[in-house]
Amino acid sequence: MVDKRMKRRLEIEWKELQKHLQQFCEGKDPITVKQLAPELWKVSFLGPKQPLKRVPQKGPLPKKDRSINFNIEFPEDWPCKPPLMYSTDREDYPYLLPGNHAPFDILKANYAAAMTILFPILGIYFLINGNIATESNAAVQQKDNRRQPKQARATQFIPLPSCAYDALRKIYADNQVMVVVCNSFQMTVEQRKKRKELAEVDQKIEEQRKRKLSIEENIRECQAKRENIEETRTSL
């Protein structure tokens, strides 16, 4: 069941998505979206003109004039939790996670409520058209897959392609808040690692600061106790 508040948010998201897709597609239909239910959307992508070359040659690959279909399921606690995005085709696409789920980290640990559903939709569009950014760890995963034929599909989450962020910034050019959101989430794997390390260092600094304050408080208490003992001894 979809409550009234979530239904209203989905209606707003749907209207915004239609407007932005029209702007992105520029009269063409590489991406079409249908509502199967308020919380269940179907997204169809027009496949690339040639088979993908940047994925392992395992399983069927998208061809010209062929639609690749995805479902988007919004959980009851959306947008606090990310939507579920997966392909409904019978084909087993190697660039998707097991179960043909979208491989983007923004749909998992790096999800934020500020993101719109346009983020993963454009990510999938550029993914199936072979326009993966070089900083993505997808290339490393693909090499590993070639060495190990039994692991022919993607097995780990990847960042959204840079070209998707470029398209998003163009679409949201008049919305500075969304531009900031795009910039803050477009990070390379190394940048994410550095940010995590920095957060860990900041946490240790805060722990040491609290420990220092606690020690200083104990010293003051001991000094006060010593002064009381001195006053008592002097009065005797």
Image (spheres, rainbow, N blue to C red):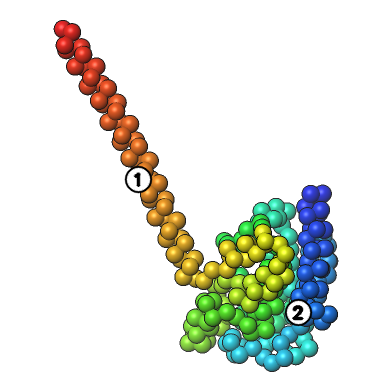
Q: Residue at x 21, y 13 (%)?
A: 231
Q: Residue at x 30, y 31 (%)?
A: 218
- Residue depicted at 46% across the width and 66% down the height: 193
Q: Which mark is residue 208?
A: 1
Q: Is residue 6 left or right of residue 120?
A: right
Packing grade of label 1 (10 A; few <14, some 14-19, many >=20) is few
Instruction: Report how far apart the C-alphas of labels 1 and 2 lie in the structure.
Output: 52 Å
Identity, as a three-letter code, of the amino acid under mark 1: Gln
SS under mark 1: helix
Q: Kindly state the secondary structure of the residue where label 2 is placed.
A: strand
Foreground pick, 14 / 148: 14
Q: 25 or 117: nearer the eye?
A: 25
Earlier along the polypeptide chain: callout 1 or callout 2? Answer: 2
Q: What label does residue 63 carry, if any?
A: none
Indicate the position of residue 124 as horizontal and vertical percent values.
68, 75
Q: Is residue 50 above or below residue 15?
A: below
The tally of labels here is: 2
Reply above or below: 132 against 13: below
Q: Position of residue 55 (x, y in %)?
A: 59, 86
Residue 107 is at least partly visible in this image: no
Q: Please indicate whether residue 39 sits to the left or right of residue 233 in the image.
A: right
> Residue 77, position in %: x, y?
70, 52
The answer to which of 205 and 136 lies nearer the viewer is 205
